[in-house]
Amino acid sequence: MFKHNYILYDIVKRSDVEYFEQTIIAFDLDENNNHTVTSINSSLGDKTIDFCKEHNDAQIISLWDSKAEIEKYNIGGNKRPNQLDFIIDTLEHFRNWYIIQNLSFPISDYIHQQPQRKFKCREYEELFNEFLSDTNANPDEVKSILNDKSRWKNPSAYLSQARRKVEFTVYQLKNHPGFTWIDPKGTAKD
């Protein structure tokens, strides 16, 4: 689920006094870069850099999960790209903190633990291109994979997009051995 704000934990020094600082990075479409940054300082108490790192690590995992979810459901419009920009900018705030603290950025460890997710359209395009480069592609197999409505939300839209990316007309694609099944009524337009 997309979170609208994250907190960067830090210990800052001003006039030889150390403070515990919480920087709230909040999603706001009305602001430059789709977010605001507000810092709140309080007494240091028993807070340490390790305390900050532990909490920042948790924030990064949450950010990474939000990023994956946004990418998974990014099917058009400008809502998801704005959210994704916010997540990426927020990750940069955290990455800069890790660099300043001379700590390794934990996301690389987290990424390797997670299965890599692909956009459905990217996955479709890769399959499309594999079939397109195979001059012996079986049209029944190509159709069953690329036209699988349980796998693809809108296979005809994905097909149209993939075809346009390789700059093929419907006629050119239909003449490819693996794609003889498309446009059986001859009504498609380029």
Image: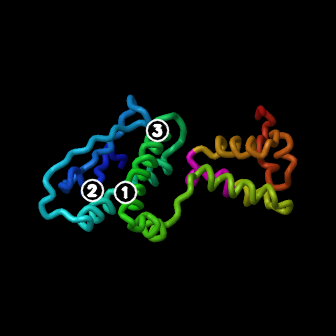
Task: Determine whether, in the image, residue 16 is placed left or right of residue 45.
Answer: right
Image point 56% across, 52% down: which residue?
119
Q: CA distance from mark 2 to mark 1?
A: 8 Å
Q: CA distance from mark 3 to mark 1?
A: 23 Å
Q: Secondary structure at mark 1?
A: helix
Three-letter amino acid code of the residue under disc 1: Trp
Magenta range is 144-153
Measured as percent of width and height from the top left, residue 109 is found at 44, 70
The kind of secondary structure the magenta stretch mainly shows is: loop
Q: Say which residue label 1 marks.
A: 97
| Among the two numbered marks 3 and 1 on one chain, the one whose residue lies closer to the N terminus | 3
- Looking at the image, what colour scheme do you see? rainbow
Quadrant where the C terminus lies? Answer: top right
Q: Say which residue label 3 marks.
A: 82
Task: Determine whether, in the image, residue 12 is placed left or right of residue 95.
Answer: left
Q: Secondary structure at mark 3?
A: helix
Residue 144, quarter of picture: bottom right
Most foreground residue, 73 or 138: 73
